[in-house]
Image (cartoon, grey):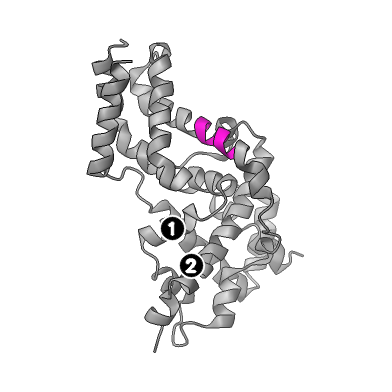
Amino acid sequence: MKSEVDFADLVRPSLPRLYGMARRLVGDEAEDMVQETLISAYRCVGQLQDLQAIQSWLTAILVNLCRDRWRAAKRQVEEVSIDDADDFSLYRHLVQEDPFPYSDSLHLDFMGLFGRDDVHAVLVAMPEIYRGPLVLHYIEGFATKEIARLLSVPLGTVLARLHRGRKLFERGLWDYAEREGLLTTEAAP
Amino acid sequence: MMTCAEATNRFWEYLDESLAGPHREVLEAHLGLCRQCCGELELARVLRGHLASQPIGESLPEDVRGRIDLFLQELSHE
């Protein structure tokens, strides 16, 4: 089974999804993370009993590697000031700033400014320990209990990080729209 | 009686259908009375939809595919 040709053939169909997931989890270092995943997988591919499970197996390895990376970076992340994130409401901000004075669907008009690349840019700008659960739950579709298992943290920690992550995502969208001039170019009367 | 702040903090759990029964009922009662929170909930629904619409099986860029293929070949000669 541990024929190298077989290994390459086995993992190749999973690469697009693995790379996409790595991009959302670690941004520009996605390719390195995929290569690390492949090294780990290659070393223990003999233990894989169900070849149909290759995608979820590779995904678990990738998340484990990301988890180790986030743990190493945790001290640095905790120094980031996000005290006011919990109080931020994108909806209230939109109502107060009123970038679309003639709109009766503020939230749709605002989010209409964001393409997939914009949403990706907002996500990768977030601290990794908050981005990870957000990506795994809302984009990759993992249940919160599964995320807790993959990241080896209590379920309560995942839920707390999801809550904080959602707030930071809302804040990130507004900051991105301002910084990139989306509001001034698109919302002008 | 639930406050608006308490309600908004639970919207995503509500949309995830992971909010426990009693909390869900209190939240729905609040939504029935608060127009602003209905707007906040709609925004949360749209944000959630934008995240869910991110492509999960995007195509691999050609340059990345080439480098990873090379890497797999090198791995095989380890």
What residue do we see at 68% from left, 58% from top? A81
Residue A28: percent from the left, percent from the top? Answer: 42, 47
Q: Do tags 1 and 2 sit on the same chain?
A: yes
Residue type, mark 1 in image? Ala
Check the image and name the residue furthest to the right.
B1
What residue do we see at 60% from left, 49% from top? A162
Query: In this image, B66 relative to A130: left or right?
Result: left
Marks 2 and 1: in contact by CB < 8 Å?
A: yes
Query: Can residue A144 be seen at all in this image of the molecule?
Result: yes
Q: Which residue is labeled 2 in the image?
A: A176
Query: SS at mark 2?
Result: helix
Q: Which residue is labeled 1 in the image?
A: A121
Residue B48: percent from the left, percent from the top? Answer: 48, 57
Marks 1 and 2, how far apart at CA: 8 Å
Which region is colored magenta? A64-70
Q: Nearer the viewer, residue A22 or A98?
A: A22
Query: SS at mark 1?
Result: helix
Q: Is residue A65 magenta?
A: yes
Residue A171: percent from the left, percent from the top? Answer: 57, 65
Seen in the picture, residue A178 relative to A12 is either above or below; the reply is below
**In the figure, residue A111 lies in which quadrant?**
bottom left
Query: Can residue A160 be seen at all in this image of the molecule?
Result: no
Q: Label 2 lies in what chain?
A: A
Seen in the picture, residue A60 relative to A25 is either above or below; the reply is above
How many labels sit on residues?
Answer: 2
Q: Is residue A29 magenta?
A: no
Residue type, mark 2 in image? Tyr
What residue do we see at 68% from left, 61% from top? A86
Query: In this image, A21 relative to B60: left or right?
Result: right
What residue do we see at 61% from left, 70% from top? B37
